[in-house]
Image: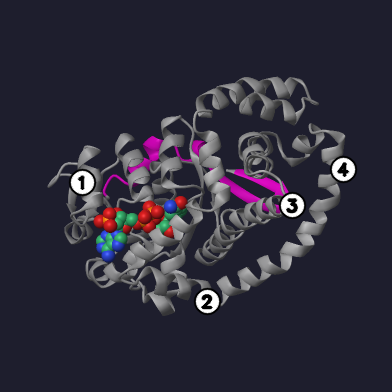
Amino acid sequence: MKDIDINGIKETIVERSDYPIEQCKNNLADEVTAILGYGPQGRGQGLNMRDQGFKVILGLRKGRSWDKALEDGWVEGKTLFETEDAAQQGTILQYLLSDAGQIAAWPMVKANLNDGDALYFSHGFGIVFHKDTKIIPPENVDVILVAPKGSGLTVRTHFQAGRGINSSFAIKQDYTGRARERCISTAFAIGSGHLFETTFEDEVHSDLTGERCVLMGLLQGAFLAQYEVLREHGHSPSEAYNETIEEALQSLYPLVSEKGMDWMYANCSTTAQRGALDWAPKFRDAIKPLVEECYQSVLDGTEAKIAIDSNSSEDYREKLEKELQEVSSQEMWQAGKVLMKGNILKYKSVLHALIPLRRNQPHFAEHSVRIIILT
Ligand SMILES: NC(=O)c1ccc[n+]([C@@H]2O[C@H](COP(=O)([O-])OP(=O)(O)OC[C@H]3O[C@@H](n4cnc5c(N)ncnc54)[C@H](OP(=O)(O)O)[C@@H]3O)[C@@H](O)[C@H]2O)c1
């Protein structure tokens, strides 16, 4: 365990060394983990557990996920079963269907929960918004959560690269007295590196706000706002795209991730520094009320209701495809596709060569990067 203190607020992190994988295996020796669902999370978590030698089976309906599982080497009748069959066999049920799928399959799953089983989630959604989802577990089971802080693909790729993904964990119901041990052992079994304790409520409120705001919604909104302003003032699509997206994603954001915002600011031109330092608070002030509005909409269940209604409709996939097509056909993203065509290999190799160079040359001009890529 490691105690951290951020600005006077103390938190405890559970590290992999606190629960060596052999100890996790001992803790779960009498369990059968049944992973229900093989989307990005079911796949990443399941493959990591299998590779680490845990007793794990999949419960899926026939179709897309089933076929993918067969391709990945799960064996029908041994490690791959129909959803209900696996739910009967499992003592820990990792409920990793889509959030709408969890609502649909709940009556079946509930009927297959035995005394002392554990019901595991990777998102607090189903439990916290139980008025709408109707997911209310019986009292004689453990209810636990491990939420990897990244997509299921990252859960897998980080594990394969020998590093774990950060996850939060929470205990909602401890019927057996072993809920914590089961939760933490499973968290490391699926490939987590560090664990932060949370509650189902905090996990879902922060997660829904994050994806609606900085992680996804605000990101697309901010990109589009800047691109449109540049275009409305006569800048070419390639210039608007490069100044909005290319430089952000390929150069500056990776540096922020690696070295921090202050470092990135310190290593840009003095003109860029001055402007960014002056404008950042204005954006904070303009955007904060909207983030607050979003948080309130998450908190009062409005966002959950919208998601459930939309995701449960028969034509959900078709409507989604149409909306995504609209995003893809925006001039901004079309510009990106055209610019990337033919340049991508050259571009990536140039960047990989330049980023280490920049680290040693603090005032390396951003423009050099663009000129090399686009010529
Ligand atoms: N994606 C992330 O970044 C992320 C991160 C952390 C936590 N989580 C959480 O992890 C959970 C799983 O998410 P995910 O992104 O991996 O998967 P997902 O894409 O949301 O779900 C896909 C899986 O659900 C199955 N499914 C959907 N409806 C079903 C139904 N009615 N009956 C049976 N199976 C059904 C699909 O089967 P078919 O292929 O047969 O349709 C597929 O196996 C969610 O609670 C999510 O919030 C996700």
Q: Which residue is mark 4?
A: 274
Q: Where is residue 326 shown, x and y percent of the image?
A: 48, 58
Sequence order check: which comes first, mark 2 or mark 3?
Answer: 3
Density class for disc 2 (Cα within 10 Å; few <14, some 14-19, many ≥20) is few
Density class for disc 3 (Cα within 10 Å; few <14, some 14-19, many ≥20) is few
Sequence order check: which comes first, mark 2 or mark 1?
Answer: 1
- Cα distance in 3D space between marks 2 and 3: 38 Å
Q: State which quarter of the image contains the C terminus.
A: top right
Mark 4 or mark 3, whichever is nearer to me? 3
Whether residue 121 is visible to the viewer of this picture, yes or no, is no
**Residue at the far front in the pictured view:** 234
- Cα distance in 3D space between marks 4 and 1: 54 Å
Examine the rendered structure and indicate whether residue 101 appears above or below residue 180: below
Q: Which residue is mark 2?
A: 302
Mark 4 or mark 2, whichever is nearer to me? 4
The part of the chain drawn in magenta is 2-30
